[in-house]
Image (tube, rainbow, N blue to C red):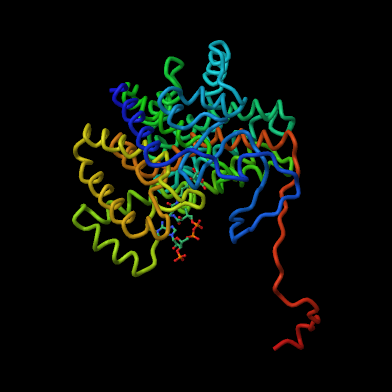
Amino acid sequence: MSKEVNELIKQAAIKAKQETDDEPEPGLTSEIEWPVEVKIGRGLEGAIATTTKIGYVNGAKGWLVYQGYNCFDLAEKSNFEETCYLLLFGKLPTDKELRDFTEKLTEYRHIPEATLDVLQKVVTPETHPMSALATGVSILGNLDSTADDTSVEAETDVSIKLIAQLATLAGAIARIRHGKDPVDPDPELSHAGNFLSLMTGQKPDEVLERIMDVALILHADHGMNASTFTTMVVNSSLSDMYSSVVAGIGSLKGPLHGGANERVLYDLQEIGSADNVESWFKEVRETKRRVMGFGHRVYKAYDPRARILGPIAKLMTDRNPKFKRLYETAIKLEEVVTRELGAEKKIFPNVDFYSGTVYRAMGIEIAMFTPIFAVSRIAGWTARALEYLADNRLFRPRAVYTGPIKAEYVPIDKRS
Ligand code: SDX
C-alpha cells in the first residue's frame, strides 16, 4: 500500500506539471538590497519580512519548495526526519548525519515526568488540545536549564528537542483528555510511527505510518505564514525558543490558519452529504461565511499539498468505507466552490481542506487535527527562527495613527 501512496504522489506531481509551470515569481526569488519598496496591504499582505533559503511558496503557480527541493519529491522520496534535517541545516543529510539526527530525536522524545504530571492535572475533555500543547511547551521551557541561552548553537539544540517532543506532548494530550495514561515513545518506530503510537497506544500499520509521514512532510514549512512569522517576531527580541514556539502554537490554533482543518470537518458533517452541498453553499454565500479549507493569502492556484492530500483522502476512505460519504461531500464541495469562486476570486482548496478527511479516516479525533499541524510545523517555525537569529533584527513595524493629536486633559469632575 505504501507503493500505492507513492504512486498517488507521482500522479499528483504529473498533474501539477500538466496544469502549471514552476517558474518562480519575479522579485521573490533573488537577493534584494534593503530597504525594499513594496506595496503593502492590510495584514502585511505583500510585505517582505526577510530573505531566506529555508523555503519558497510559489503562490501564482501553486508550488512549494524546501531548501530548493519540491514538496512532491520530498513527500514521495523523503521522510519527516530527513525533511527536518534539510530545513534546519540546509542540505539533505548523509546516511551517518541522518542516523545521528534520528538518534538525537529518539533520545529527546522522552519528556520530563513533571510535564506529564501538570498536564494530567490541568487537561480535561473540554481543554482544546492546542491550548494544552502551548501549556506543555511552556512547562518544558521551565524545566530546561538551557532555555535562556539564546546562542544559535543552544537554540538549535532546543529546536531539535522541540521537534522530538511536540509529538510526545500531542500524543500524551490526546490520551490524557480521555482519562488515559500517556504511553512511552518506542525507539524502534519512526517519528510518524511514534506519533501515532503515542496518540493511540498501538503500533500503527505501515500504511498509516506512511500517510502520517507524508502529512508531516507536507505541513513542515510554508513561508511567512502567520504562526511562523509569530515565532520569528517573538524570537527576534532575543527571547527564548520555548516562548517563541508557545506563541507560534497560539497563532496556528486560529481557524483562519491551522485551526481550519478541524473546522472543515465540522462543515462537512454539517453538510451531511454531496446532495446538500449546493444548498449549503448558497446559504454560506448569502451569509458571507468563509468556506473553511479554501482560499489562501499567497496561493492563487491549487495548493500543491491539497493535490497530494486529496487522493490520499480517497485512498483512506476506500480503506475505511464508513467515511466514504465524507469524502464524496468534500469532492462535491470542491467542485462547487471552485466553480463559483475559483476563476473569479482565485479561491481553491488549501492544505486544510483534505487533511481532516485523511486524519478522520485514519481514526484520529477532530480535536487532534490542528496539533498534528503543530507537530509538523515545529520544524519550519524553528528553522526560520534560527535562520533569522543568525542575522537578527527586532521586528517592529509601524501603524498609521488616525486619532486626535493634541487632546487636552480634563479633570474627572469636569467630564460629562
Ligand atoms: C493555512 O499562510 C500560509 O501559508 C498558511 C498555511 C500554512 O501552511 O501555514 O497555508 C495554512 O492557514 C491555510 C489557510 C487555512 N484557512 C482557511 O481555510 C480559512 C478560510 N480561508 C480564508 O479565511 C482566507 O482565504 C485566508 C484567511 C486563508 C486568506 O485570506 P486573505 O488573504 O486575508 O483574503 P481576504 O480575507 O482578504 O479575502 C479576499 C476575498 C474576500 O472577498 P471580497 O470581500 O473581496 O468579496 O476572498 C474571499 C473574501 O470574502 N474569500 C473567501 C474565502 N477566502 C477568501 N470567501 C469564501 N470562503 C473563503 N474561504
The x, y position of residue 317, in whole percent, is 24, 37
Which quadrant is the N terminus positioned in? Answer: top left
In the depicted structure, whether residue 253 falls above or below residue 179: below
Which quadrant is the C terminus positioned in? Answer: bottom right
Residue lying at 40% horizontally and 25% vertically, measured from the top left: 76
Instruction: Pick the residue in front: 17 or 51.
Output: 17
Instruction: Pick the residue in front: 54 or 213.
Output: 54
In the depicted structure, whether residue 203 falls above or below residue 138: above
The x, y position of residue 10, in whole percent, is 36, 28
Residue lying at 39% horizontally and 34% vertically, measured from the top left: 175
The x, y position of residue 29, in whole percent, is 61, 40
- The image quarter containing residue 365 is top left
The x, y position of residue 387, in whole percent, is 67, 34
Left or right: 78 as drawn, with respect to 321: right
Instruction: Pick the residue in front: 344 or 366.
Output: 344
Residue lying at 56% horizontally and 24% vertically, measured from the top left: 85
What count of labels does the image hold?
A: 0
Left or right: 305 as drawn, with respect to 27: left
